[in-house]
Image: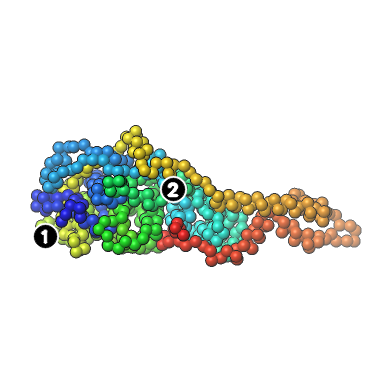
Amino acid sequence: MEQGEALFIGGGGEGYGEAQSLLLRFANRHGLIAGATGTGKTITMQIMAEGFSRAGVPVFLTDIKGDVGGMAIPGTPRDAFTRRAETIGLEDIGYGAMPVTFWDMFGEHGHPVRATIAEMGPLLLSRILELTDAQEGVINAAFRLSDENGWPILDLKDLQAMLVFLGENQRELSQRYGNITTASVGAIQRRLMVLENQGAAQFFGEPALDINDLMLRTPEGQGRVNILHAERLMRTPRLYATFLLWLLSQLFEELPEVGDAPLPRLVFFFDEAHLLFNGAPRALVEKVERVARLIRSKGVGVYFITQNPDDVPETVLAQLGNRVQHALRAFTARDQQALRRAAQTYRPNPRFSTEEAIRDVGTGEAVTSFLEPRGAPGVVERTLIRPPSSAMGPIDAPMRAQVIAASPLAGKYEQVIDRDSAHEMLARRAESAAQEAAHNEPAQAGQTDEPAREFNQARRYQPPTPRSGTVATRPASASRASSRDTPVDAFAKSFARQLGTRSGQALARGVLGTLFRGR
């Protein structure tokens, strides 16, 4: 097997001298890196990312603990690394820096990452906000209303404006979109306030991330390593997991089919994968399964990183062909069952017990299985993982700033764009309705007496004292005019008349409810 056709992961077999490699043409068959805390999962992700980058494949990964940024600087030679390289037959560790692009949802440790709420879609947004079915229905109504009327929902203030509009016009809109209650609207607004307090307002907006910027290469043909700084983001685990799922869905919806290719177009490492599936409704898990199954035809490989394979649903786990299993500790009966289940997913090796190997491997060692040339899972092997070429650990602030400044994307995403959208459009609409009502008021003043004008203006109204032998009456036309001419009613009725003319114009959305940006 030629070096350019596979990634060297480490050495296995007797004496650890047999090369254990991942075939590049099967890299889009996805994979799993699992193991207990402190067993070497992060370093395995690092050496795989380095290998893909050298092969010309762009990589996206997350830096959960702030200890992956060192990939931007060369590694330091160590005696332990030299000895391991000799043991596994690695002639040259090849110390060097990777071409890194730093990203950060909050814009503090990398280029800002943003997405519009319209692109996120109602399903994923409801997942972030942890909404009930009834509240999710209100969110869907807001998106449908936005699509039909051309009111873009780009950031949080746009969504908040749409919810205010739904609440003020719930009676008319409930007839078209189902029951919309002020309680549901209020609950969603409170959830949005919490999300805003956590800093997520910086994520929703423009300029939105262009996924093509994740697939850049250097002039020498090396794939860029995109590192998302996620230390702060992990304080909101559901937002973190949903953002990565959104990114996968964007790749799935926008990239063309490539079929069988010698190299993947992008490799995506999904760290802390259990956060995606914890408490997820069955409908969402099914959609994740579908994306994982079909996205490989777009040339994208997805590698889930988690502590225990049980964290990943079986329907998704079955699609992960390349596996690196670090040690699992069996301290409880439940741990022993999980260890046994993990061992049963591998093709057995007659030289050793897979279950015992998973329990006994040390730090920097793993049980591995990669797809063979014919596409079948390889026999499980105990493998010493190769040393990394770039530095292990964090990068200091001045060096990070230099890398960001030298990035080919410097300046593209730093400036926020606030274009005309739902918030501004609805504000102008309300102002126009109020001005029209104020303009009509003088004409009405000449046709009604002072008590009627006070009634229309919502001031205290005292009914006139009827004359002896008569009954005080109020013309029916005046009653109709008063209800018709209030600003809120004029606004609502004008909108209701337009609903019938905008049907069928909803924008197309993809498998996870995200907006087709290319439409």
Q: Secondary structure at mark 2?
A: loop
Residue that badge 2 annotates = 114
Q: Residue at x 50, y 49 (%)?
A: 155
**Amino acid on which the number 2 mark rests in the picture:** Arg
Residue 378 horizontal/vertical position (percent): 18, 60
The residues bearing labels 2 and 1 have C-alpha atoms spaced at a distance of 51 Å
Q: Secondary structure at mark 1?
A: loop
In the image: residue 340, left or right of residue 418: left
* Circle 1 residues within 10 Å: few <14, some 14–19, many ≥20: few
Residue 122 horizontal/vertical position (percent): 47, 57
Q: If the image is split into quadrants, where does the N terminus sit?
A: bottom left
Among the two numbered marks 2 and 1 on one chain, the one whose residue lies closer to the N terminus: 2
Residue 134 horizontal/vertical position (percent): 50, 60
Q: Given the current orientation, which residue lies at the most extreme top position?
A: 398
Residue that badge 1 annotates = 350
**Amino acid on which the number 1 mark rests in the picture:** Pro
* Circle 2 residues within 10 Å: few <14, some 14–19, many ≥20: many
In the image: residue 134, left or right of residue 83: right
Residue 378 visible within the image: yes
Q: Given the current orientation, which residue lies at the most extreme right position?
A: 468
Q: Residue at x 39, y 59 (%)?
A: 253
Q: Residue at x 35, y 39 (%)?
A: 406
Q: Residue at x 73, y 51 (%)?
A: 438
Q: Is residue 304 above or below residue 43?
A: below
